[in-house]
Amino acid sequence: MQKRGQAVMEYVLVTALFLLVFVPTTYIFLSQISKSSDELSKSKLTKLGTSVVNTAEEIFYQGPPSSITLREDMPSGVQSMYIVSDWNRIPPVNQLIFNYSGGTGGSELLVFTSRVNINGSFSDVAVTAGQKNIEVTASRNASGVAFVRVEVR
């Protein structure tokens, strides 16, 4: 009877030791994967924003009717995308902004500043994950002020 009790106790101790090692290791591994995935998505979004702003500046200086279509990947986690423009302010404000929500649960704004007048509005479909065609076109408004229109399709 005592040998049987000893075997059960050894089994319980081995199982407890296994769980003591396995559970924290699994938690650390999964949190690192989530962190790496979040950093990769932010890196893709930074590349996308920089590419759009650099292309907008290039197209602006070429003038109307210049146009370029970029084919870029929109990463998951983008909640919204918008442009803040105040062309009358000195110095003017022209920013492409992504509202990004990563795996950590927090929300973060990624801001890309342009030296040229940019314009555009984006639907909810524009920020869904996947391949996007981003059309960057030089234009002039009714007053003759040059700007660049950014459209995501």
Image (spheres, helix red, strand yellow):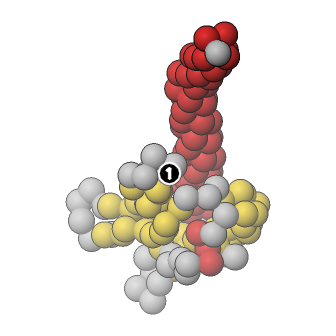
Q: Is residue 96 left or right of residue 130?
A: left
Q: Is residue 129 left or right of residue 92?
A: right
Q: Position of residue 74 (x, y in %)?
A: 65, 59
Judged from the image, the secondary structure of the residue bearing numbered disc 1 is loop
Q: Say which of 14 and 18 sits in front.
A: 14
**Does the rendering let one see residue 54?**
no
Q: Position of residue 19 (x, y in %)?
A: 58, 25
**Does the rendering let one see residue 4?**
yes
Q: Position of residue 112 (x, y in %)?
A: 45, 52
Determine whether 113 is above or below 133 in the image.
above
Q: How many marks?
A: 1
Q: Report the residue at 58% width, 50% height from top.
A: 45
Residue 27: quarter of image:
top right
Q: Which quadrant of the figure contains the C terminus?
A: bottom right
Q: Report the residue at 37% width, 68% height from top.
A: 84
Q: Position of residue 26 (x, y in %)?
A: 60, 30
Q: Report the residue at 55% width, 78% height from top.
A: 124
Residue 2: quarter of image:
top right
Q: Say which of 68 and 134 sits in front.
A: 134
Q: Amino acid at mark 1?
A: Gly
Residue 64: quarter of image:
bottom right
Q: Is residue 41 left or right of residue 66?
A: left
The residue at which mark 1 appears reads as 102
Q: Which quadrant of the figure contains the N terminus?
A: top right
Determine whether 66 is above or below 77 in the image.
below
